[in-house]
Image (cartoon, grey):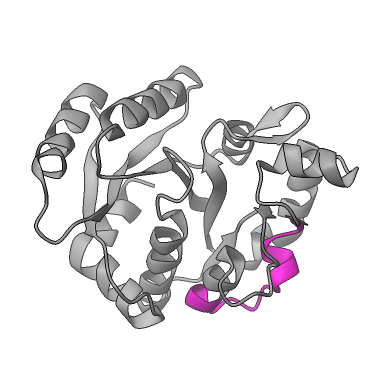
Amino acid sequence: MKGIFITGTDTDVGKTVISSGIAGVLRDQGVNVGVFKPMLSGIKRDDPESDTYWLKKMAKTPLTLEEITPFQFEQPLAPAVAQELEGTSITLEDILKHWETIREKHDYFIVEGAGGISVPLGKDFLVSDVIKALNFPVLIVARPNLGTINHTFLTVEYAKKLGLTIAGIIINGTSEQGDLVEKTSPNVIEEMCSVPILGIIPKIPCITDVTVKQLIEDHINVDQLEGLI
C-alpha cells in the first residue's frame, strides 16, 4: 500500500490546500489516488468549504464523502473533546476498520490528519497513533511566521521519537514580499531538523481547484515526493 500522511505543526496551517493540491496533481499525472480524512470537526463534510469536500473534488475519487470522512462532529474542537460533548466515543479500531473497507479502492492514498500530530482523536489515542497504524511516511506542513522554528522542530522530534518516517516539510503561506522571518526560517528548520524542505508555498488570494494545483506544480517537486514514499 502506497501513500502519505499529511499533518501540521498546528491547526489552520493549510494541510487541506496541500493535501488536495497534491491529490489533484497526481490525478492529472494518471495516478489512481484516493483520499482519507478520518475525522472532521466544526463543519459538515458535504459543505463545499469542508476539507472532505475539497479532498474529494481534487482527487476526483468515486469514494463518497462518508467513506472519505467516516466521523464528523458539530463543534470546532479537537475530535476527542467534540466526541465527549456529543456523548460518543470513537476508537482507533473504529478508524482502522473503516480504513480496511476503502484501502484497496485506490493504488495510492493521501491521508490528512486533524490539526497537529499530537491532537487527541479519541479517549486514548492521538493523530500519531493513526500514522503509526497506517505506516505511511509523514509530510509536515508548517506556517512561515515567527514561532514556526520551535513548532516545526518539536513536531519533527516527536515524530522521530515514535519511529515515524518523515518525508519532508512544506512551509505554507508566505507573504508576497517575505519578511526576515520567512527568509531565514527555512534554512534554520532544515539544519535543526535534518529533514528536507520540499516546498515553500506562497499565500494566494483566491483558492480554486486550478490555483491550488498550479501552486503545487510551481512550488513542490511532486516526483521527488513520490520518490520518498
Please give the name of the residue rendered at 60% of the width and 37% of the height, measured from the top-left corner: 127
Q: Furthest-top residue in view?
A: 161
Q: Is residue 90 visible?
A: no
Relative to 70, is 109 on the left or the right?
Answer: left
Does the magenta-highlighted stretch encompass residue 140? Answer: no
Q: Is residue 177 visible?
A: yes
Picture quadrant where residue 219 is located: bottom left
Relative to 49, is 18 on the left or the right?
Answer: left
The image shows a total of numbered marks equal to 0
x, y percent for residue 159? 45, 26
Please give the name of the residue rendered at 67% of the width and 63% of the height, measured from the top-left corner: 43
- 206 above or below 184? below
Foreground of the two, 225 or 143: 143
Please give the name of the residue rendered at 70% of the width and 29% of the height, measured from the top-left corner: 125
x, y percent for residue 169? 30, 42
x, y percent for residue 94? 81, 44
Foreground of the two, 80 or 102: 80
Q: Furthest-right residue in view?
A: 87
Relative to 157, is 125 on the left or the right?
Answer: right
- 134 above or below 212? above
Start-end of magenta stretch: 57-71
Picture quadrant where residue 49 is located: bottom right
Foreground of the two, 103 or 156: 156
Does the magenta-highlighted stretch encompass residue 66? Answer: yes
x, y percent for residue 166? 38, 35
Please give the name of the residue rendered at 38% of the width and 64% of the height, measured from the top-left corner: 22
Foreground of the two, 21 or 142: 142
